[in-house]
Amino acid sequence: MLRVRRTALLLLSSFTMALGQASSNPVTVKATNGIVTFTNTGTVSIAAIVATTSTDGNVGLFRHDYYFNKSGFGPSDYQDFDMVVPAARAQGHIPQVSATVVFLQFADGSTWGDAQRPEVREMIAWRKAEKEAFQNLVAAYASGGDTAFQNAVSALPATAPERFVARLVADLQKQGGSAAAVASINDRLAAAAARDSTGKF
């Protein structure tokens, strides 16, 4: 089961619209000590989540896409989102924080919330771009090994969402080198292909 803590102030990803509309939102939100906790209280895995946030009245955004994650945000899973910058926390300043879920996509492709929000529409394009970037990296490694792979990573645009792909790959390489990074990318592509095969992503 997924147990994740996110400390970034803005977590961006991508996702797409689905065909069905779910009748209820199973995600509960709790704010404690500047940390917002999202919990899936439902019985179905979630493929993507979008929420608006507030920090002392300043509006922000939380969004996470599990499109490339086979398991998704499963039943009883929770995710912590630390909304306090490290400097403020070090000084003991804990602002008033809150979050409201505005969109969900479930593992079966159904959705809950507003699919026409600009953030959702942006994520649609990001998902496709991320997949293309992953596929290009895998192809580079297959044709030219580590050197070609490194060159392909370096050639990724410095704009979103490709810069997030580059950041992920860099983390994967630190953990196990290029071969391990490619294996992880292939796992992500397989998860995406499984979702695409439903015709609802």
Image (cartoon, grey):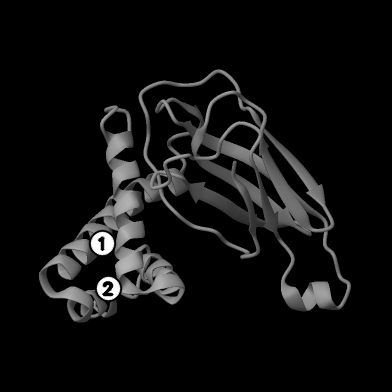
* Foreground residue among 54 and 12: 12
**SS at circle 2:** loop
Task: List the residue tagged with mark 1.
Answer: 133
x and y percentages locating residue 47 in the rendered image: 46, 38
44 relative to 15, above or below? above
Give left or right: position of 123 versus 197.
Answer: right
* Foreground residue among 24 and 189: 189
x and y percentages locating residue 190 in the rendered image: 29, 45
* Rendering quarter of residue 16: top left
**SS at circle 1:** helix
Give left or right: position of 100 versus 46.
Answer: right
* Rendering quarter of residue 200: top left
CA neighbours of label 2 inside 10 A, class few (<14), some (14 to 19), many (20+) = some
Task: List the residue tagged with mark 2.
Answer: 156
Q: What residue is shown at x 72% (from left), y 71% (from top)?
A: 85
Q: What residue is shown at x 61% (from left), y 27% (from top)?
A: 25
x and y percentages locating residue 103 in the rendered image: 53, 36
Task: Name the amino acid, label 2.
Answer: Leu
> Most extreme residue toward the right, as rendered?
92
> Most extreme residue toward the top, as rendered?
23
Task: Name the amino acid, label 1.
Answer: Ala
